[in-house]
Amino acid sequence: MMWSIHNHLLLLIAVTCCALFQPLHAAWISGEEAIMGTKVSVQLWHQDKSQGEAAVQAVMEEFRRLDKKLSPYIEHSELALVNRMAASEPVVISEEFYRLLETSHVYSELTKGAFDITFASIGHRYDYRKGVKPSDSTIDTALPLIDYRNIRLAAANRTVSFEKPGVRIDLGGIAKGYAVDRGIELLQQRGIGHALISAGGDSRLLGDHRGRPWHIGIQAPRDKERMAAMLPLVDNAISTSGDYERFFERDGVRYHHIISPKTGRSAGTLQSVTIIGPNATRTDALSTSVFVLGAEKGMALVNRLEDIDAVIIDEDGEMITSDGFTDAGSQ
Ligand code: AMP
Ligand code: MG
């Protein structure tokens, strides 16, 4: 009898201690994996280690799901299917894929065609790792295929079709940002209030870093070891597009992965563009777009958009910031 009361008391004390000291177990939990051809990292604050780790895994799983759907390199991805079929007949696609195509269309219109997922009609002929590029005559012949108006969307039966044979699409300029947003949504659903998800150059922050801002670096384009700037950010998304991510050099020319839809060749003269905004789909699409538009037109667009700020590093390595930049930096 005595034993039992004693045990109950001990148990009660143990339970009370646990309840009192639970916040002490709260911690930063992180994970990192290679998905979508890039490094995906998640960092979050959670009261419970195993729930925190499960949340990290849920984000990674979401990235893997989207990679399977959107990758141009996976034979049975929805994107690869569309590229194979849509020039011959309308293809019924998933709601999610349809929405992404609609969003891409919005950015094509907003940027007067600088953002254009049909860049892939020529883009797929580059292999940056192997140093392969299409010939001038191949580019000239295929150039009319690059035009987002070659994509026909029909909402009534949720189909996509291409106007011309040879048109191809690639969501590489927006998919990582979209995946980051989806990951953040999953964390919000789990009640998480402080987190960072980043996929290569696209990141989004949930809340602050517990009492202070997050600090996100802008890489120095010509020196991997150095940051050109550190930005204090809270509850924001940030994307960087650079000519140093995927490229090769031939005869003094840098061939990189951001393609000007007007020329079918690597875009412009900038070294990098960083966009800060409310969500990563938007910052991802706009960082690619502003890179294509160049400093003058790109910054004019950014300064027209109230929710967007930008840091451009131009061909001389000089930093140019948007009108509202100091405000964004000090949030
Ligand atoms: P980011 O690093 O976000 O700028 O994305 C670069 C990727 O966007 C490239 O690897 C291509 O997959 C894709 N891309 C290249 N040029 C364009 C373009 N003009 N419009 C849309 N996406 C593009
Ligand atoms: Mg982008």
Image (spheres, helix red, strand yellow):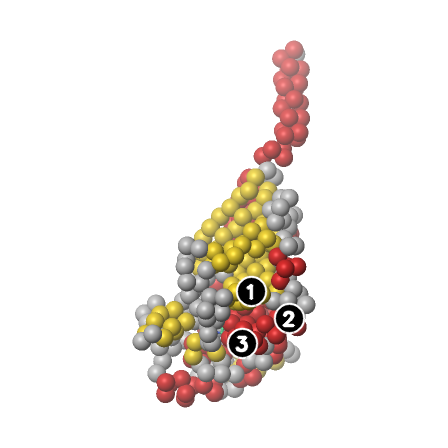
Q: Residue at x 48, y 78 (%)?
A: 260
Where residue 140 sits: x, y (%)? 41, 87
Residue drawn at 49 percent across, 52 percent down: 41
Residue denoted by label 1: 311
Which label was assigned to residue 293? 3
Task: Give the residue type at disc 2.
Answer: Asn
| Front in this rendered view, residue 125 or 85 | 125
* Quadrant holding the C terminus: bottom right
Above or below, 9 relative to 156: above
Q: Residues within 10 Å of mark 3 (few under 14, many from 20)?
A: many
Query: Is 330 above or below relative to 80?
Result: above
In which quadrant of the rendered view does residue 320 lie?
A: bottom right
Q: Describe the element under mark 1 as helix, strand or loop.
A: strand
Indicate the amino acid at tag 1: Val
Q: Which residue is mark 2?
A: 303
Contact? badges 3 and 2 (CB < 8 Å): no
